[in-house]
Image: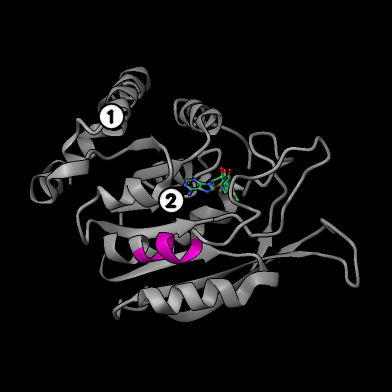
Amino acid sequence: MGLDMYATTAKEAANERNQETTQMMEGKSGLLDDRGEAAKRLAVNRILAGDCIPVMQGFPDACIDLVVTDPPYLVRYRDRKGCNVHNDDRADWVGPAFRQIHRVLKPDAFCVSFYGWPHVETFMTAWKQAGFRPVGHMVWHKEYASRTGFLQARHEQAYLLTKGSPSRPDRPLSDVQPCTYTGNRHHPTQKAIKVIQPLITAFSKPGDLVLDPFLGSGTSAVAAQRCRRRYLGIEKDKNFCAIAESRLAVADPDAG
Ligand SMILES: C[S@@+](CC[C@H](N)C(=O)[O-])C[C@H]1O[C@@H](n2cnc3c(N)ncnc32)[C@H](O)[C@@H]1O
């Protein structure tokens, strides 16, 4: 399963990642042209800068063991400093992105997708049209209200989706989990590593390849690395790619 990759120094790995990412974006890598060859040469433990739809189109079919992802919620989010999230103001990418996610997942595998509850129909339609089956719904309870309107907003939410019929985990997770506040130090809508890690442990095995096509500041890749999984992350914003690389290069990226 090639766990020897952990022997590579963080600096060497980052250099290699940058070189291959550049080649891939320039179309020089097998990832973009020859699917048969690409299947053999899919470079792992990489952060790929770009739009996840064309980037995933360069992946072979059925090469990913688990997808854990936190896509834009379609809510035109803006934090106190005025920072927003790419593609949070439009929904045309949702269907194409989840079609690619379904295609690149191996048969009988899981996808955990966070989503914005005001647009549940958009996400659910896209998931079902892509071929996913919703098999569970998870809620993370916040100790604080992230917004107050008709209600205090005190939860995050995700669907557990399956492609085919994966086996049930030996010890199923509770579908209500605690939510750790990150302080959004690395990303305006950052998830905590402690939120993502149990998902990776429950729905994949050591050495498996975990993909997050909406990587943000790299939380799922860091969580996968900590769980001794291989990872691939895709992120449109180059600044967040750089932040993710730096989080992956240190032993303890943050307490979250
Ligand atoms: C909700 S944030 C993910 C935050 C992440 N969970 C973290 O802890 O940092 C969604 C991310 O998806 C990225 N994004 C939006 N559309 C994208 C696309 N088509 N391809 C790749 N990344 C995209 C945004 O730039 C944003 O960083």
The residue indicated by pointer 2 is 212
Q: Secondary structure at mark 2?
A: strand
Instruction: From the viewer's side, name the closer residue of 254 and 64.
Output: 64
Mark 1 neighbour density, 10 Å: few (under 14) some (14–19) many (20 or more): few
Residue 125 shown left or right of residue 164 in the figure: right
Tell me the magenta residue range. Answer: 94-99
Residue at the spot 32% in from the left edge and 51% down from the top edge:
56
Whether residue 75 is situated above or below residue 223 in the rendered picture: below
Q: Quadrant of the C terminus?
A: top right
Residue at the spot 34% in from the left edge and 48% down from the top edge:
54
x%, y% of residue 224? 41, 47
Tell me if I can see residue 23 in this picture. yes
The residue indicated by pointer 1 is 26
Residue 13 shown left or right of residue 113 in the figure: left
Residue 60 shown left or right of residue 147 in the figure: left
Q: Secondary structure at mark 1?
A: loop
Say what amino acid the circle numbered 1 marks.
Glu
Instruction: Decide if ligand 1 comes within 8 Å of the CB at mark 2.
Output: yes
Mark 2 neighbour density, 10 Å: few (under 14) some (14–19) many (20 or more): many
Would you say the magenta stretch is mainly helix, strand or loop? helix
Q: Earlier in the sequence, mark 2 or mark 1?
A: 1
Instruction: From the viewer's side, name the closer residue of 7 and 243.
Output: 243
x%, y% of residue 235? 47, 41
